[in-house]
Amino acid sequence: MSLSKIVALAVYVAAVAAQAPTETYPATPLASKGPYTYPSGIPYKVDTDTHLIRGVQHGYNICNSTTAGQDSLCQTMHVNSVDDFCLWGPPEMGREVGDIEGIMVAWCTQPRHGTRLIPAEALHGVQFMKTPDYAQVVGFIDQTKINILAGDYGGEMDPHGADLRGNPMGGLVFSNQFTGSPIQAIEWHNFMGNNGFCIKVCDPNGPDAANFCEHKLDRIGCAYNAPNNARNGTFESCEGESQDFPGIHTNAAGVTTSYNQPAGPITSISYTARVPASSNCRQFESTSIYSALPTLTPTGVTTTSTTSGRVVTSAPTSRPATTGNAPGSGSGSTPTPTPGAGNTGGASALSISFGAVAASVFAALFFA
Ligand SMILES: *[C@@H]1O[C@H](CO)[C@@H](O)[C@H](O)[C@H]1NC(C)=O
Ligand SMILES: *[C@@H]1O[C@H](CO)[C@@H](O)[C@H](O)[C@H]1NC(C)=O
């Protein structure tokens, strides 16, 4: 959502309900809070604002054995390894990711983080990648097992959002990959949807954390924000070189260009993001690395109706254009990821907010 829309919404809210909160921005942006030491320095809620138009933080940040379980509202997550990572997912089934990015909760592969668990057999392929600048996990998932509607192109979560409260609001991300102990990654991005995901957590001590974990290209998915060669059916842990900053591309002639996401429909993108070299990939059996995961059904009802009454089917091209949405989806009304369906093999979570025609053009360009 653009700043002008947020301001317009704030004015509108003020006009129709004098009692309602009218302010948008917190005194301190989420990305400027902390860093919090794990676990003792973490407050019960990182976002304590009660007077802002997006409402209050949905869950909490102190997560332990008492908060673990499939109704957990833990919003502190970890990205450590191929067998120990978390994703942001909806607390309940029923609404599109793009409408509820602000209230996403942690879904993890290990029970010890005080969160929900990604159900057994939901993960169909996972690649963990460690580079000098970040740790990244890209994968293929049956998203309905973590409360994401079938056919939902999804969305992008990051610690900024249009109102600087983050998506989810108050969400924290930790990794033990930078110092050997869990430290907070200030900059990260996570695309969820279209049965794929990518999450990148940038080394907070690295010089370019904000660039590698760029959060503005929220509609063009994993293929451009986390270019990868993850394969469905393969579970592996690799080391690699770092990507180009999202949006930065150097062509064969050595000319470097910078892509800016347009406000309107995206029908084509003039470049393909470079997948950096990787090495030392070790492969695993999913049954051995995810042995702690329970066989579970999603919470809530498995409806395919969205809150706005639109029907979402599993056919991506039938997804209607999203409409102007609440401030809740700070990244605008778009998200969407999709693992590269059998083409290049790279998971490419995409976020598309345009209509069916444009979507099929886009699909033809990128998934054919
Ligand atoms: C466990 O988490 C709950 C909920 O955040 C918190 O109230 C409680 O103090 C925590 N317990 C310990 C031992 O940290
Ligand atoms: C990945 O492979 C599984 C098992 O073959 C399949 O059910 C699933 O649809 C695939 N996912 C994607 C995103 O292609």
Image: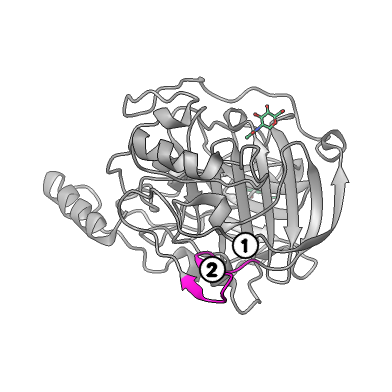
Residue 178 image offset from top left, x and y in percent = 74, 69
Other residues around mark 2 within 10 Å, as few (<14) / some (14–19) / many (≥20): many
Q: Residue drawn at (71%, 38%), measured in percent from left and top?
A: 232
Q: Which residue is mark 2?
A: 249
Q: Which residue is mark 1?
A: 274
Quarter of the C terminus within the rendering: top right
From the viewer's perspective, tell me whether residue 330 is left or right of residue 290: left
Q: Residue drawn at (44%, 43%), measured in percent from left and top?
A: 362
- Extent of the magenta region: 243-257
> Please, is residue 125 above or below residue 313 in the view?
below
Is residue 119 inside the magenta stretch?
Answer: no
Specify whether residue 33 is in view.
no
318, 84: nearer the viewer: 318
Residue 151 image offset from top left, x and y in percent = 49, 29
CB of mark 2 within 8 Å of CB of mark 1?
yes
Q: Amino acid at mark 2?
A: His
How many dots with numbers?
2
